[in-house]
Structure formats: structure tokens, C-alpha cells
Image: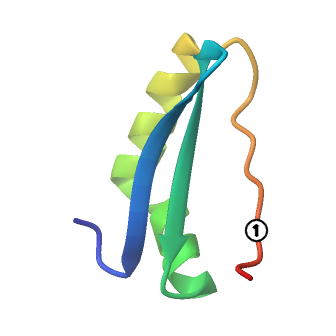
Amino acid sequence: KEKDCLMYIPHVVKNDPTEIVFFEKYKDKEAFKAHGSSAYFKEAAQKFEDLLEGKIQVKFLEEV
């Protein structure tokens, strides 16, 4: 329900249920930056750090 977030779909990797991928699509770069700097994202990211083995990885994809 975030403004300018066009898509947010969590996935579990089929052969590795411990790996979770969040597919997110934003209106533009500014919307993505606003998401990353929001208080609720920072709070959630801090909670995830306690649950994850490694760091959160962000990959930027180009739509074809």
C-alpha cells in the first residue's frame, strides 16, 4: 500500500525455503529511494538483520 510502489511480491525459493526474494517495482528511482529512507523500512530492516544469516542483497533488474 506504499505510494509509488507498483509491485511487491515476496517469494520463497523452491529448492531452498530458507531463501526469500522480494520482487519490488517502483514508479521511479525517487520512489525507491523514498522507500529505503522511510522509518518503517529502516525498522523492518533492523529486525531482519537479527533473523538473517547474511546481509540483505539488492539487485536492480531491467524490464524487457
> Which residue is painted at 45% across and 24% down in the image?
47
- Could you tell me which quadrant the C terminus lies in? bottom right
Placement of 13 over or under 9, stated as above or below: above
> Which residue is painted at 50% across and 37% down in the image?
11
Residue position marked by numbered label 1 in the rendering: 61
Placement of 64 over or under 13, stated as above or below: below
Identify the colour scheme used.
Answer: rainbow
Mark 1 closeness class: few <14, some 14–19, many ≥20 residues within 10 Å: few
Side of 32 relative to 39 (left or right): right
**Closest to the observer: 41 or 60?**
60
- Could you tell me which quadrant the N terminus lies in? bottom left
**Closest to the observer: 64 or 20?**
64
Side of 11 relative to 62 (left or right): left
Where is residue 38? Give x, y as percent: 41, 61
**Closest to the observer: 57 or 33?**
57
> Which residue is painted at 51% across and 30% down in the image?
46
**Closest to the observer: 62 or 29?**
62
Task: Give the amino acid at mark 1.
Answer: Leu
Q: Residue 30 falls in which quadrant of the image?
A: bottom right
Q: Secondary structure at mark 1?
A: loop
Side of 52 relative to 42 (left or right): right
Where is residue 28? Give x, y as percent: 56, 88
Where is residue 51? Give x, y as percent: 53, 12
> Which residue is painted at 42% across and 51% down in the image?
9
Where is residue 25? Give x, y as percent: 52, 71
Q: Residue 32 falls in which quadrant of the image?
A: bottom right
